[in-house]
Image: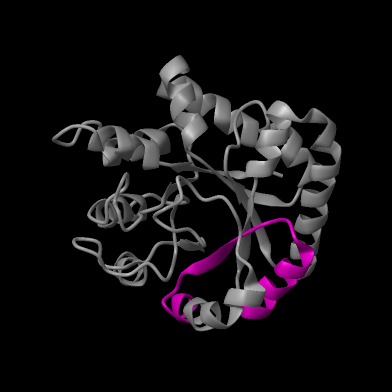
Amino acid sequence: MKTALSINLNKIALIRNSREGNFPDVCAHAQACIDHGADGITVHPRPDQRHIRASDVPALAELVAGVKHVEFNVEGNPLAPAIGSYPGFMDLVAVTKPDQCTLVPDSDAQLTSDHGFDLIQSGATLAPIIAQLKDQGMRVSLFMDPDIRQIELAAKLGADRIELYTGPYAEAYKHQPTQLASLLAQFGAAAQAATDLGLGVNAGHDLNLNNLAAFRQAVPALLEVSIGHAFVVDCIALGLPAAMAAYVKACA
């Protein structure tokens, strides 16, 4: 089964933000990725706007809306408030209405997303948020660890999908190969449990051309991967067209 490839543009925006002006142009890179076979575009606009800015999101939403079979995925903490020119996560997605809204339990203090939701603690808060997003026409995905008990709660809350946090897998693939078999079995079991509950399964975080094949083999129901950091690094080495071709092939 083909896995949809959604390209995360945060690192492109981070490079842009290091200088004045609009170079590199985030929308131009989104279009280039789409032209070379991307199935989706992902952004994670944080309140500190360290990479993707709130002002980028409407333009990207408009760009993707004009392309058949390509989806726009906006990630973030639904509790992130309005700060300065950042309107708050829920207001931002209400205006731009992405195809998929991936809720992530991160904070500005985190360098990057590094854990899934604990729905025992946050489920009551998330339930009306999930319902609100679905009422606005968005598919809702929750960023989750491969914990079957937590995944069962995600289904009860009305989520459409989960995005499995693959950071520990990527770390083990690189530095702790003896742990790979047990980790992949854990991810496979979690994905199967999600599928049995009617949840779609996405995955993301530090997936790359080296570790993606083994993960896809362990999680055959994988619907979508979101890849940004590794993709941009590979673009530096290979160029964007070649990097896109390699990732499209890895997801086929």
- Magenta segment, which residues? 132-158
Say whether residue 5 is left or right of residue 60: right
- Identify the residue at horizontal 25%, vertical 31% (top origin): 24
Indicate the quadrant containing the C terminus: top left, top right, bottom left or bottom right.
top right
Image coords of residue 95 (percent x, y): 29, 69
Residue 29 within the magenta-colored segment of the rendering? no
Residue 53 locus on image (x, y percent): 27, 51
Which residue extends farthest top?
A: 237
- Residue 179 visible here: yes
Give residue 119's quadrant in the image. bottom right
Does residue 122 appear left or right of residue 22 in this picture?
A: right
x%, y% of residue 54? 27, 56
58 vs 4, left or right, is left
Q: Is residue 55 left or right of residue 187?
A: left
Residue 133 colored in magenta in the image: yes
Q: Nearer the viewer, residue 65 or 29?
A: 29
Q: Residue at x 44, y 23 (%)?
A: 235
Of residue 224 and residue 229, the one placed in the foreground of this image is 229
